[in-house]
Image: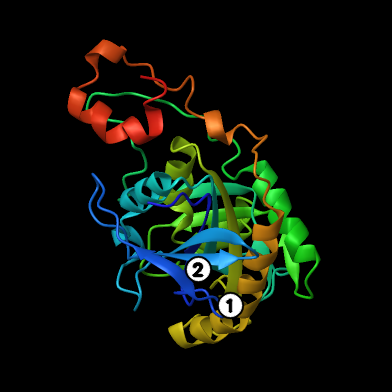
Amino acid sequence: MREVKIAVIGGTGLYKMEGVGPVERIDIDTPFGSPSDSISVCSLDGRDVAFLPRHGVGHRYLPTEIPVKANIWALKRLGVRHIISISAVGSLKEEIHPRDIVIPDQIIDRTRDRDGTFFGDGIVGHVSFADPFCPELRTLLGDALSSLEHPYHKGGTYVCMEGPLFSTRAESNLYRSWGGSVIGMTAIPEAKLAREAEICFGLVALTTDYDCWNEGEDDVTIDIIVDNIMATTAAAQDIIKKAVSMIPEKRTCGCGEAARYAIVTDREKIPPAVKKKLDIFYGKYF
């Protein structure tokens, strides 16, 4: 199997890389089941990039149903070190307009029914998550955006809700009072699991609408979201192509050793089956 160091996880409206033919399609079995779909390996500016549609081609998975553990494990198996995640979001701020792009630097986790860790079943670990997005990749994505003619915002807090229903007005105003910038349904547990897997993770948030706090706007509908997401998908593809060319071969951030001191369980007490399942992440620490 070829080694691929860069991956793109596509969200709503982004199910393939336009204008780039796949070099190879890969199906990977994981200890956590099958990923959302086959992984397409494409070539961008001479660099291999793995593409995985988060919801599956045809949009088959609810946010809570996405097999995130399998997705991250499979990308790690390929050798991925950087993930660019594309996510549709609603705006919680007047100045973030529909069709704007946001590169968030923080997350508020409001999910409740998702497994957000590879630890458990006989192994305990605690990985730092103070800065949930790789600072170097986040800066790089911002620089890529600044070279394009598209409205964007560097920084901001992504509120991740459970879904699949959208917010009530009371919830939307609560998130605004907390300082939320955008709201979506998929950044968690992706960002958490990528950090535990020691993969750099950056998110490109495509704003589809104002969340329902803005009573001067029509209530959000799927039609509005689809229209706006299609309008920003081309910009997202441009960002990906620009960012891929900027990603360095060697990492200087701390993501690659995020779990070095995380495991607190006595190595002799970790069940062999768990060691085998997580060897791809932590074998160097076992």
Q: Is residue 254 left or right of residue 161?
A: right
Judge whether residue 4 can be spotted in this image: yes
Q: Secondary structure at mark 2?
A: helix
- The residue drawn where x is 74% and y is 64% is 145
Apparent side of residue 142 relative to residue 162 in the rendered image (left or right): right
* Mark 2 or mark 1: whose residue is earlier in sequence: 2
Report the quarter where the C terminus lies.
top left
Q: Which mark is residue 8?
A: none
What residue sits right under mark 2 in the picture? Answer: 169
Q: Is residue 91 visible?
A: no
Spatial CA distance of label 2 from label 1 is 28 Å
Q: Which of the labelled discs sits on residue 233, or is there none?
A: 1
Q: Which residue is at the front of the view, 93 or 222?
A: 222
What residue appears at the point 46 percent right and 45 percent down from the top-left corner? 79
Which amino acid, by three-letter code, is at mark 2?
Arg
Task: Identify the residue at image location x=41%, y=66%.
Answer: 24
Classed neighbour count for the residue bearing mark 2: other residues with Cα under 10 Å, few (<14), some (14–19), many (≥20) = some
Q: Nearer the viewer, residue 38 or 120?
A: 38
User: Three-letter amino acid code at disc 1?
Assistant: Thr
Residue 229: percent from left, percent from top: 55, 79
Vertical side of 30 occupied by 262: above or below = above
Q: Nearer the viewer, mark 2 or mark 1?
A: 1
202 relative to 246 in the view: left or right? left
Residue under the image location 65 percent in, 39 percent down: 250
Query: Seen in the image, is 18 located left or right of residue 192?
Result: right
Q: Position of residue 117 (x, y in %)?
A: 36, 38
Q: Residues within 10 Å of mark 1 (few under 14, many from 20)?
A: many
Indicate the secondary structure of the residue bearing disc 1: helix
**Residue closest to the eye, 135 or 169:** 135
Q: Position of residue 167 (x, y in %)?
A: 45, 66
